[in-house]
Image: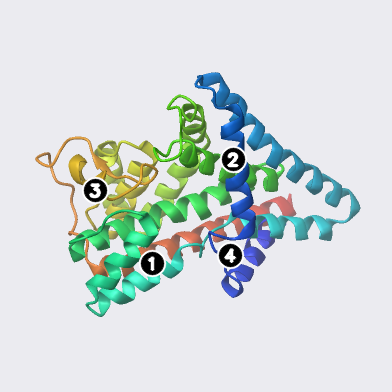
Amino acid sequence: MTFLSILFALLIEQLKPLRADNPIYTLVRSFSARVENWFNAGHAHHGQLGWAFVVLSLTVPTALVYWICLHISIFLAFAWNVLIVYLTLGFRHYSHYFTSIQFALNTGDEVTARALLAEWTKQDTTGMEVGEISRIVAERALITTHRNVFGVFFWFLMPVGPACAVMYRVAEHLARAWNEPDHMRSEVFGRFAERAFYWIDWLPARFTAAAFAVVGNFEDAIYAWRNFAGRWQDEASGIILSAGGGAMGVRFGTAVENVTEILPADAATVDSFGAESEIPLGEAPSPRTLQSTVGLVWRALLLWMFVLLLLSFAVWLG
C-alpha cells in the first residue's frame, strides 16, 4: 500500500500540482506563528514546548484518522495515505520557478532570470552573472527536492507513515520559520527546532546523497561527499550538494562573504575554508547544469520508486 500511495499521489500531483502557497500550508504557517507568539518568552525550554505542541497537534490527529480508517476499510486507509502524501510531497511546489528560470537562461533573458530568482529566494540578485544564477537555482532545486520529496519518502516508510510524513514536513518548516531573522524574537527559541530537524533529517539526507551517487557519477559523488561536504555550515546541505555536484560533475559552493547575501539560512552553501582553499572537482555551473539537475532528480526518484516496489513485493511475499 505504501508504494501505491506514493505512486498515486505523484500522479495526482502531476495532474493537479499543489503550490507552496496553498491553503493547508498557509494554515500551518499561521498556526506555527501563533504558537511562537504564545510560547516565546526568551528561554530555550519554551522553544521545546512550542515545538512539541505544534508537532503533536498535527501528527497525533493524522495518526488517529489513519488508525480509524484502517479499522473501517483498507481502501479508506489507502485514500487517507494518498491524501497525506499528496499534501506533504512537494515535487512541483517550486517547479514553475525552476522551469521559468531555465527557459529564460536558455533564451539569454538574464533580466527575467534574475527577477524570478529574486522572487523565489527573496534575495537581491542585481548584477548576478549567468553562472551564479545557474549555481543557486541548481543548489536550491536539489535541497528543495530532498526536503519536499525524498525526506518525505523516507519517513512515510516508517510505522504510521502518514503521521511520520507530517512530522517531517512540520519539523522542517519550524526549523526554518523559527530561525528566520525577520521573524524570530529570541534566538534561543528556535534553537531546539533547528536541532530537532537536524536529527530527523540525519538519515534521509544521507539516503538522498546515496541515491544521487548511484544514479550519477558514483566515484566522483562519493569523493566529493567525503572531501567537500564539510565546506557547508549546514551539514545536511553539504552532504546533498557535494554528492549531487559530484554526481553531475559540477562544482557547487561559494565563499562565505558571497553566499549569505544570496541564499537563506536553510539552503545556504557556505565554503567554511574560504575562497582560497582547494577547489572541488567539476565544471563551473552553467545553464546546462539545470538540465543535468532535472535528469539527476528524476533518476533518483525512479530509483526510490524501484526500491519501494521491491520492498512492497518483499512484504507481500513475506
Q: Label 1 neighbourhood size at 10 Å, few (<14), some (14-19), many (20+)?
A: many
Left or right: 71 with respect to 94? right
Asked if residue 297 is positioned above or below residue 146 in the image, the reply reads below
Residue 198 at x, y percent in the picture? 46, 34
Asked if residue 28 is positioned above or below residue 277 in the image, the reply reads below
Q: CA distance from mark 4 to mark 3?
A: 30 Å
Query: Please, what secondary structure does the residue beneath circle 1 have?
Result: helix
Q: Which residue is mark 3?
A: 253
Q: Which residue is mark 2?
A: 32
Task: Say if residue 157 shows up in the picture.
Answer: no
Name the mark nearer the viewer: 4 or 3.
4
Task: Say if residue 181 shows up in the picture.
Answer: yes
> For the N terminus, which image quadrant?
bottom right
The residue drawn where x is 54% and y is 64% is 19
First in sequence, mark 1 or 3: give its number.
1
The residue drawn where x is 14% and y is 46% is 279
Q: Which residue is mark 1?
A: 98
Quarter of the image where one finds residue 250: bottom left
The residue drawn where x is 26% and y is 43% is 260
Q: Are marks 1 and 2 in contact (CB under 8 Å)?
A: no
Q: CA distance from mark 1 to mark 3?
A: 19 Å
Quarter of the image where one finds residue 247: bottom left
Residue 64 at x, y percent in the picture? 80, 42
Query: Please, what secondary structure does the residue beneath circle 4 have?
Result: loop
First in sequence, mark 3 or 2: give its number.
2
Q: Are marks 4 and 3 in contact (CB under 8 Å)?
A: no
- Amino acid type, residue under disc 1 in the picture: Phe
